[in-house]
Image (cartoon, coloured by chain):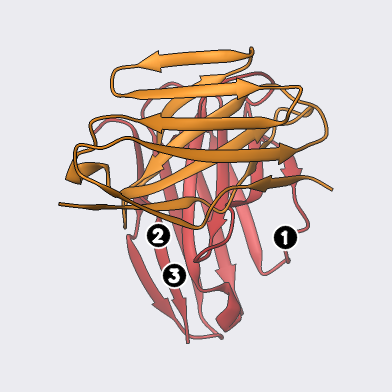
Amino acid sequence: GQNIDQPTEMTATEGAIVQINCTYQTSGFNGLFWYQQHAGEAPTFLSYNVLDGLEEKGRFSSFLSRSKGYSYLLLKELQMKDSASYLCAVMDSNYQLIWGAGTKLIIKP
Amino acid sequence: ETGVTQTPRHLVMGMTNKKSLKCEQHLGHNAMYWYKQSAKKPLELMFVYNFKEQTENNSVPSRFSPECPNSSHLFLHLHTLQPEDSALYLCASSQDAGSYNEQFFGPGTRLTVL
């Protein structure tokens, strides 16, 4: 079966760094996405990785290791507005997105 | 308007009612999707339309009926729903459904079935 695992909830302090991990087992691989979803709002696209390595975009970076079926999202200089759920999704061989349940990130002052 | 819009934002219905959810995208995309999001569960893909043709129906009960009259509009018709169908229903669109393309989501309809 297809499976995406990520922690249910994480807590971090404003100004700090947090790493949200995602492991996956899917039928084929056509890339991994990270989305951010604030409570009551639409998920919004953060990053896409299809090759191994680190992609940096401002305060957010995303890493992929295809051999390990592993990705992480790194958030630096945390701000209160970063409190949200972070969704990991893998595009399978049929170009369908397989989603994790999301990681709720709580930022404390 | 820009992006992906959904109406209504909130809906409460009885199990014998018939209602419809509407989604409209203003991005010129060719693929549209319906997802169900329940608390602490992964997004569940329900239906996919690519160039107005339904390409996926992931074992969704027949009480959910999609309609895609054109590439910009997507409906989800609901009838005789069950309380366990209460969830957030998200619509999304992408350039097309056959390759990598990020999906753009609407704000969702929060559905409560009594």
Q: Amino acid at mark 1?
A: Val
Residue B113 image position (x, y, % from top left): 49, 80
Earlier sequence position, callout 1 versus callout 2: 1
What secondary structure is marked by label 3? strand
Q: Helix, strand, or loop for circle 1?
A: loop
Residue B74, image x and y in percent? 51, 44
| Colour applied to chain B | red
Q: Is residue A83 above or below residue B100?
A: below
Please give the residue where the numbered disc 2 appears in the rendered image: B109
Q: CA distance from mark 1 to mark 2?
A: 18 Å
Q: Nearer the viewer, residue A108 or A51?
A: A108
Tag 1 residue: B60
Which residue corresponds to mark 3?
B111
The residue positioned 57% from the left and 13% from the top of the image is: A53
Residue B51 x %, y %: 63, 26
What shade has chain A been given?
Answer: orange
Q: Amino acid at mark 2?
A: Thr
Query: Same chain for the residues at labels 1 and 2, yes or no?
Result: yes
Residue B70 drawn above or below residue A54: below
Examine the rendered structure and indicate whether residue B1 appears above or below residue A59.
below
Q: Are marks 3 and 2 on the same chain?
A: yes
Of residues B37 and B78, the one drawn nearer to the viewer in this rendering: B37
